[in-house]
Amino acid sequence: MKNYKLSYHLRSYIKQELYDYNRNKQILKDLSIKESTQITTKTLLILTKKVNSIENVYNNLNENDQEIFNIIFKKGCNQLYAKTYYNITKDMYYNAMNKIIYLVAQEYELI
């Protein structure tokens, strides 16, 4: 098993980016509909890169990790809720979360 340890600050940053993924994706979708926007090109490019990086990681995950990704970051479930309603053990929850965070940090080229 690979060690997916990161510094606290990097881990917190990536975790927040993963929680913001759906919102960022919706912003990009809304911006593609509107032609005149107040957002700069640089901001749009950064947002697009973040969403594409997370999608690349998601597509490369196995089926179980994709399910846990959806439970943690799309539905926003904590470990106890995931254990109760989705029958996901504490080890599975945290191992998958650490793996996802590590892979996204690699995709962002932060490590």
Image: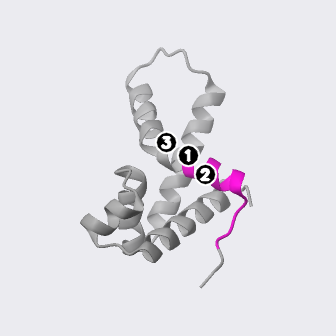
Residue type at mark 2 is Ile
Q: Which quarter shows the N terminus?
A: bottom right
Q: Are marks 1 and 3 in contact (CB under 8 Å)?
A: yes
Q: Are marks 2 and 1 in contact (CB under 8 Å)?
A: yes
- The secondary structure type at the circle numbered 1 is helix
Q: Nearer the viewer, residue 100 or 87?
A: 87
Q: Which residue is mark 1?
A: 17
Quadrant location of residue 69? bottom left
Q: Which residue is depicted at the point 42% across and 29% down?
A: 32
Measuring 62% from the left and 64% from the top, which residue is drawn there?
Answer: 102
Marks 1 and 3, Cα distance to the nearest angstrom? Answer: 5 Å
Q: Residue furthest left?
A: 85
Disc nearer the start of the sequence (2/3): 2
Helix, strand or loop at disc 2? helix
Residue that carries the numbered disc 3 in the rendered image: 20
CA distance separating discs 2 and 1: 5 Å
Q: Is residue 3 above or below residue 58?
A: below
* The C terminus: image quadrant: bottom right
Image vertical order of residue 71 relative to residue 99, above or below = above
Q: Where in the figure is residue 71, as x and y percent of width and height?
A: 35, 59
Q: Which label was assigned to residue 49?
A: none
Chain part drawn in magenta: 4-15
Q: Label 3: state its secondary structure.
A: loop
Query: Residue 5, position in %: x, y?
Result: 68, 69
Q: Amino acid at mark 1?
A: Glu
Residue occupied by mark 2: 14
Image spot of residue 28 (x, y percent): 45, 33
Q: Amino acid at mark 3?
A: Asp
Crowding at mark 1 (Cα within 10 Å: few <14, some 14-19, many 20+): some
